[in-house]
Amino acid sequence: MAYFFLRLLPPRPTFPHDGSGEEMAAMKRHVEYWHRNALAGSAIVVGPVFEGEGAFGMAVVEVEDHAAALALADGDPIIASGFGFRFDVLPMPSIILRPPAV
């Protein structure tokens, strides 16, 4: 298995603070998609990161290979929404995980 950092870049630097109703509905589908991937075990951590006037999204995933990481990114409904989001998919050669909570 391999680890990847997925960075979701928004369509503009001020997103999500100025998101339209349609964009926020697409974001809801995006969140549901990543919840399913977390439950399935491929997504380790997912969430927004606030930066400046806006935010970007991030996920750390454990998958078979780069093609599988790309497939996760491409399968995100926010990409198909046509609002201009895009992912950077970056390999993580090693990670340190905390032990599971008891």
Image: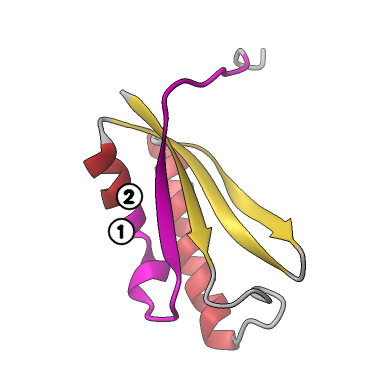
Residue on which the image places disc 2: 72
Q: How was the colour assigned to the protein in this rendering?
A: secondary structure
Question: x%, y% of residue 39?
Answer: 44, 38
Question: x%, y% of residue 40?
Answer: 38, 37
**Alpha carbons under labels 2 and 1: distance apart:** 5 Å
Closest to the observer, 56 or 23: 56
Does 98 appear above or below 23?
Answer: above
Does 90 appear above or below 7?
Answer: above
| Residue 16 is a magenta residue | no
Q: Is residue 13 left or right of residue 69?
A: right
Residue located at (53% from left, 69% from top): 27
Question: x%, y% of residue 50?
Answer: 72, 58
Q: Is residue 21 left or right of residue 18?
A: left
- Residue lying at the far left of the rendered structure: 67
Which dot marks residue 75? Answer: 1
**Could you tell me the amino acid type at mark 1?**
Gly
